[in-house]
């Protein structure tokens, strides 16, 4: 069997299985959140640490000819900050690994560094080391470390994919679909779509929103990196629940709604990716504290549906309920509607 | 200018410069050791954290056709543990990133995971997450996090490259040259060199030795990953000192000495790499505590020379002092004696 048949999630599950067989290391007893969430969390004396890593490969995760290097530097760090945001944590230090072909112009790397520095400043992250290796294809990998609050007993206060409960409200920050439409515009060289292209090139991590939600008592979140339905599916699988989403409630990116037809718009909003919004599930009580359309530290939060018992995701339209086929980005798959180029 | 002209160390210096211009993040004030050492170290309440990352790219850092996947998994983690060992710290949790071509057999990844699990068990490290991405060429990147002791004022007790002082003794753990000779044997398909090949495929991180040295008061160390003279040069540059090495004192790998001619043997011992021994500089006082040929938690420690004032490295032979040309592994250079294939 090839990895393309097993897929990314299959490979991750297999890794988790291989490591579960490992005799318990001393550290393992302090692990609070392991493989399968946005970030790992473990207890230390008096607190909890968070760590995550994300990699961008030229030609797989970005268009090398059309992506400014400064934007790429920004994005490489911001997508990691987004993972920490989805846990409700605070990022702190980052390690950066660059895989570089020998003929890479140094001027491009300077721009990349400038973008990393910009994102570091924006999110309060110090880049403190890393590794630079020769590679036939460019890649950048960032490992980001931070911390989380703990309760009186030392348990980390973080938002997990596995904490959704039937009856919870579903809400998403900001707007959806813009980044995927922006990639399309960048690929096709469409004019007048700068706002969408920026959404793709310069994602914002909802860092303050994540902390605000967590402090208000939200216990379940994920960042929308692989598409709303794909990431909602992750929550459903991890929590063993289903979800009902109201199509009309989805906060479509305004620039997307203005530029594309309704059918395309919906496709980008539910199956596009890289919006890096926060998708949360929240109890009625916590929702009271957040407000029905809470403004989370500058980010609007829109209620889009509800967590239900059972399996699968239903999308409710005016005409009734439909179970629409969906597929988000699978690194080794070949879905036709993935937003990343192959 | 291309990155191949600037070289790895030039690129790292440039990154440090780009980030120094960055307005100080809150986290930066807690940074104790930043870019340019074996690992980064920062203060937290009541302690200090260590983080490092190392990447292995197929065809650059290992021979894909001749390297068993299980060994590769071991090595990917062990080389990171070696960096933490060189700081005198304790590793704790790791994130693993895999870049995989689509047609990679899953059976190979299973073996890779098994090797990672073995090393995790050996060094007390829990693998707690990571990222799996599609890539045209296989690579594995590990980010390893751990901790260090602190003194009464909260300052991390770690060994730094920059802490060598003229008059210090130079000492190295274990033996040198075996790993580079093992790579040669693997490349050439030499028979009867299994011990050397194992040295290349299954490096041991001198974790306990590092902690023992640090506890005995050693303040300066590096792990020998790029070749003795290259890594000694790193200490000399960071500490603004020179070094005098006695050729006859070098602990040559016994299997290397048995299999190769003296000239080749010396070349592997001083310019080969990936031995992952610890090179330390130590005051006479601390050396007293360690003993002249101290046994550091199962690893012999050999005195090989002395730190001197001035610049450069002298190698002393029976016939007098010579300043031998040397070059260790430079990821973007084209040195003829690098042990890694291009």
Image (cartoon, coloured by chain):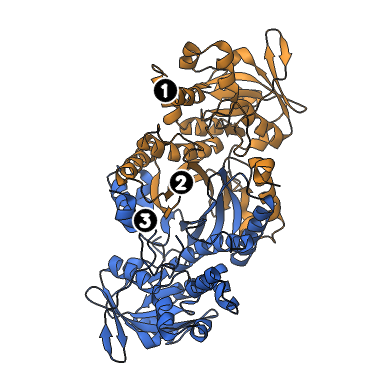
Chain colours: A orange, B blue
Q: Chain of mark 2?
A: A
Image coords of residue A145 (percent x, y): 48, 47
The disc label shown at residue A221, or none: none
In space, the residues marked 2 and 3 are separated at their CA atoms by 27 Å
A237 displayed left or right of B249: right
Q: Nearer the viewer, mark 2 or mark 3?
A: 2
**What residue is pinned by disc 2?**
A137
Whether the residues at callouts 2 and 3 have beta carbons within 8 Å, the answer is no
**What residue is pinned by disc 1?**
A189
Q: Callout 2: few (<14), some (14-19), or many (20+) C-alpha neighbours within 10 Å? A: some
- Asked if one can make out residue B130 in the rendered structure from this viewpoint, the answer is yes
Please tell me in which quadrant of the rendered image residue B48 appears: bottom left
Image coords of residue B20 (percent x, y): 29, 48
Question: Relative to A192, is B291 above or below?
Answer: below
> Please, which residue is most extreme toward the left here?
B310
Q: Callout 1: few (<14), some (14-19), or many (20+) C-alpha neighbours within 10 Å? A: few
Number of callouts in the render? Answer: 3
A264 displayed left or right of B338: right
Q: Share a chain, discs 3 and 1? A: no
Residue at image position (41%, 83%) is B250
Residue at image position (60%, 80%) is B192
Residue at image position (25%, 69%) is B240
Classify mark 2: helix, strand or loop: loop
In space, the residues marked 3 and 1 are separated at their CA atoms by 41 Å
In space, the residues marked 2 and 1 are separated at their CA atoms by 24 Å
Of labels 2 and 1, earlier in sequence is 2
Pick the residue in front: B127 or B243. Answer: B243
**What residue is pinned by disc 3?**
B34
Image coords of residue B256 (percent x, y): 50, 81
């Amino acid at each position: 069997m090839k990895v393309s048949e097993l897929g990314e999630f299959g490979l991750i599950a297999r890794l988790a299985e291989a490591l579960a067989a490992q005799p318990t290391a001393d550290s393992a007893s302090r692990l609070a959140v392991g493989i399968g969430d946005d970030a790992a969390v473990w207890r230390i004396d008096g607190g909890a640490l968070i760590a995550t890593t994300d990699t961008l490969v030229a030609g797989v995760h970005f268009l090398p000819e059309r992506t400014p290097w400064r934007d790429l530097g920004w994005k490489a760090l911001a997508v990691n900050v987004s993972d920490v945001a989805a846990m409700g944590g605070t990022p702190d230090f980052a390690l950066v690994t660059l895989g570089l072909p020998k003929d890479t112009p140094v001027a491009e790397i300077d721009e990349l560094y400038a973008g990393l520095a910009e994102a570091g400043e924006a999110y309060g992250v110090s880049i403190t080391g890393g590794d630079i290796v020769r590679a036939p294809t460019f890649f950048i990998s960032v490992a980001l470390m931070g911390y989380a609050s703990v309760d009186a007993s030392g348990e980390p206060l973080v938002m997990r994919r596995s904490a959704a409960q039937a009856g919870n409200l579903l809400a998403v920050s900001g707007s959806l679909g813009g980044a995927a439409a922006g990639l399309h515009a960048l690929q096709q060289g469409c004019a007048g779509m700068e706002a969408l292209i920026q959404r793709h090139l310069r994602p914002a991590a909802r860092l303050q929103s994540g902390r605000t939600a967590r402090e208000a008592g939200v216990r379940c979140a994920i960042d929308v990196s692989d598409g709303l339905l794909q990431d909602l599916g992750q929550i459903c699988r991890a929590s063993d629940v289903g979800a009902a989403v109201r199509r009309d409630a989805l906060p479509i990116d305004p620039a997307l709604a203005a530029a594309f037809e309704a059918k395309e718009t919906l496709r980008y909003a539910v199956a596009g990716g890289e919006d890096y919004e926060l998708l949360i599930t929240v109890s009625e009580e916590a929702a009271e504290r957040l407000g029905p359309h809470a403004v989370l530290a500058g980010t609007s939060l829109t209620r889009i549906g509800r967590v239900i018992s059972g399996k699968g995701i239903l999308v409710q339209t005016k005409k009734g309920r439909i179970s629409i086929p969906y597929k988000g980005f699978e690194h080794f798959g070949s879905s036709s509607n993935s937003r990343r180029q192959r």
